[in-house]
């Protein structure tokens, strides 16, 4: 809708047989309206993951051309690791890092381009691969093999240090589309029916009267656009 900004939080490919159409459509929207459409990098916008989870095979089946795969890796390496909304909400695909005293400037300083892969940078890898712990404090290694798991104390300290309201991330399938993973950390997952019955989630961030943004969650089901907003609720104010 006119006047809205749209941020897609990564993992656009490796999600079924039409990943190519999804990423091309998003890139076309971004090219047509670069000040309106924003795309964060997910852990699936990466070479080793694409080789294993479908995007490489999809490109080879459709075009049989490794050069195209290489071009996509170049494009993916230019996608930002995170986006900052109204200086108050940090949106990244995975989560936080165990790097001490992590600041927004550390994220801004991350290199991009030239085919850079997440495993080339510990911070980039953590931002794209980490998960919040629902309970428990501190940080631990992740069973995913990359990234960490982090507690609400890590989130709270990061938000305080960077004068942020909250962290929004994706990366985990949430059957109800959106959830509060722990205080200050929301998860939104927007691929309905990835597993049967999974809802697609959308978070809407709006300026309110005060400093904080108002965050509302909505869900949709596959192929039923009329259901958008049907289950809207306010997550905080
Ligand atoms: Mn992911």
Image (cartoon, grey):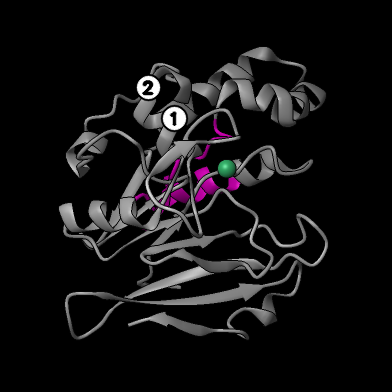
Whether residue 162 appears in this view of the structure is: no
Q: What residue appears at the point 38 percent right and 25 percent down from the top-left corner?
A: 122
The reply to whether the magenta stretch includes residue 39 is: yes
- According to the picture, the residue beneath numbered tag 2 turns out to be 121
Q: What residue appears at the point 45 percent right and 18 percent down from the top-left corner?
A: 115
> Looking at the image, is 124 positioned above or below residue 17?
above
Q: Which residues are magenta?
A: 25-45
Spatial separation of the CA atoms under disc 2 and disc 1: 6 Å
Whether pointer 2 and pointer 1 mark residues with C-beta atoms closer than 8 Å, the reply is: yes
Q: Position of residue 14 (x, y in %)?
A: 69, 37
Q: Quadrant of residue 227?
A: bottom right
- According to the picture, the residue beneath numbered tag 1 turns out to be 125
Q: Secondary structure at mark 2?
A: loop
Label ID, residue 164: none
18 to the left or right of 5:
right
Of all residues shown, which one is farthest toward the front?
A: 136
Q: Quadrant of residue 175?
A: bottom right
The C terminus appears in which quarter of the rendering?
Answer: bottom left
The reply to whether the magenta stretch includes residue 150 is: no
Q: Secondary structure at mark 1?
A: helix
Depth check, front residue: 48 or 173: 173
């Amino acid at each position: 809708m006119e006047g809205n900004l749209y941020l897609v939080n990564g993992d656009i490919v490796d999600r079924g047989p039409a990943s190519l159409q999804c990423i091309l459509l998003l890139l076309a929207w971004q090219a047509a309206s670069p000040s309106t459409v924003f795309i964060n990098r997910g852990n699936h916008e990466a070479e080793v993951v694409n080789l294993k989870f479908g995007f490489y095979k999809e490109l080879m089946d459709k075009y049989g051309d490794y050069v195209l795969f290489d071009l996509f890796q170049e494009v993916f390496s230019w996608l930002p690791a995170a986006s900052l909304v109204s200086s108050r909400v940090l949106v990244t695909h995975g989560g936080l890092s165990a790097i001490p005293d992590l600041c927004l400037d550390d994220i801004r300083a991350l290199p991009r381009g030239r085919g850079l892969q997440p495993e080339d940078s510990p911070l980039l890898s953590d931002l794209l691969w980490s998960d919040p712990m629902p309970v428990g404090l501190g940080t631990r290694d992740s069973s995913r093999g990359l990234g960490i798991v982090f507690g609400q104390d890590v989130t709270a300290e990061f938000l305080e240090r960077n004068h942020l309201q909250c962290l929004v991330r994706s990366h985990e399938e949430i059957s109800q589309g959106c959830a509060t993973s722990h205080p200050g950390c929301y998860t939104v997952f927007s691929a309905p029916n990835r597993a049967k019955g999974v809802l697609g989630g959308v978070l809407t961030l709006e300026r309110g009267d005060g400093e904080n943004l108002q965050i509302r969650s909505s869900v949709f089901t596959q192929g039923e656009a009329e259901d958008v907003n049907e289950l809207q609720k306010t997550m905080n104010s």
